[in-house]
Image: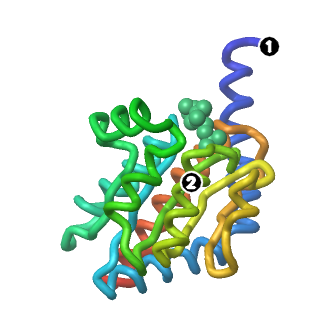
């Protein structure tokens, strides 16, 4: 296969995954955006986490909340738990890598806040531990996953929301997670500020 054929395959697979996701996930994305808006109007915040490319997604979303998405509007409260290298390395060094999000959440999360967790496999132990802490604190969990949802899908409670991208490919799932994040930003802005 030529290099250009490989590129065409990546684009075709990405387009197909997005079409599959569009056909199955619109209602859940709408519902998730409404839960985030409910939290924000009650002076609560969104805490985000993820590993690797998903750490990038977590901070991408929080920066669009804190700064702006596509319009001028007030800053919205969000914290990415994947960004503070001093805190992350010390927790991993002194305790365990599985604790890097959970320990921050114990300090920063409050009842009514939302944990927005990104995991393509649903099997990252530090995400599972963060979800357990979120539940202890009466936070709602919105999980962006893929594949079969992994362990994560089994630890969510009945009010949590799992948005599972119908794909087995980590890269394709991440590409749709980014699109879903931008949908959430747009829907949040629209519900809060109109237009
Ligand atoms: O970006 C990629 C692959 O596209 C990688 O960095 C990937 O995010 C890492 O392998 C993560 O550790 C995978 O974690 P998860 O999505 O299974 O929770
Ligand atoms: Zn990636």
Query: Mark 2: is the Cβ under 8 angstroms from ligand 1?
Result: no
Disc 1 residue crowd, few under 14, some 14–19, many 20+, Cα 10 Å: few
Quarter of the C terminus within the rendering = bottom left
Q: Is residue 36 above or below residue 87?
A: below
Q: Is residue 168 above or below residue 188?
A: above
- Seen in the image, is 63 located left or right of residue 125? left
> Where is residue 184 shown, x and y percent of the image?
47, 67
Q: Farthest residue to the top: give it.
A: 2
Is disc 1 in contact with disc 2, using a CB cutoff of under 8 Å? no
Vertical arrangement, residue 136 with respect to residue 12, above or below: below
Residue 80 location in percent, x, y?
36, 52
Residue 179, by quadrant, is bottom right
The residue nearer to you, when weighing 91 against 61, is 91
Secondary element at tag 1? loop
Q: Quadrant of ligand 1?
A: top right
Residue at 46% in and 47% down: 57
**Residue at the image point whose x is 65% and y is 72% from the top:** 26
Q: What residue sits 34% from the left and 72% below the top?
A: 45
Task: Tell me the residue that label 2 is attached to.
Answer: 129
- For label 2, the crowd category at 10 Å Cα-Cα, with few meaning under 14, some 14 to 19 and many 20 or more, is many
- Queried on whether the Cβ of the residue with tag 1 lies below 8 angstroms from ligand 1, the answer reads no
* Distance of label 1 from label 2 (alpha carbons): 42 Å
Q: Earlier in the sequence, mark 1 or mark 2?
A: 1
Which residue is disc 1 drawn over?
1
Q: Which of these two is toward me, 73 or 152?
A: 152
Element at label 2: helix
Judge from the rendering whether residue 189 lies leftward or rightward of residue 154; answer left or right.
left
Residue 15 at x, y percent in the picture: 68, 46
């Amino acid at each position: 296969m030529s290099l250009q054929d490989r590129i065409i395959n990546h684009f075709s697979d990405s387009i197909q995954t997005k079409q599959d996701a569009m056909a199955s996930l619109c209602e859940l994305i709408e519902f998730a955006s409404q839960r985030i808006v409910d939290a924000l109007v009650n002076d609560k915040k969104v805490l985000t986490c993820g590993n690797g490319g998903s750490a990038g997604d977590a901070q991408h979303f929080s920066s669009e909340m804190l700064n702006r998405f596509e319009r001028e509007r007030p800053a919205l409260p969000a914290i990415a738990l994947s960004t503070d290298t001093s805190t992350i390395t010390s927790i991993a060094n002194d305790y365990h890598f599985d604790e890097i999000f959970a320990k921050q959440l114990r300090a920063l999360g409050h009842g009514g806040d939302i944990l927005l967790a990104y995991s393509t496999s649903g099997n990252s132990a530090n995400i599972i531990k963060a979800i357990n802490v979120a539940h202890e604190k009466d936070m709602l969990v919105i999980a962006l996953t893929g594949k079969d949802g992994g362990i994560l899908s089994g630890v969510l409670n009945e009010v949590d929301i799992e948005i599972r991208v119908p794909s087995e490919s980590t890269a394709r799932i991440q590409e749709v997670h980014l699109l879903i994040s931008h949908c959430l930003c747009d829907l949040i802005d629209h519900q809060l500020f109109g237009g």
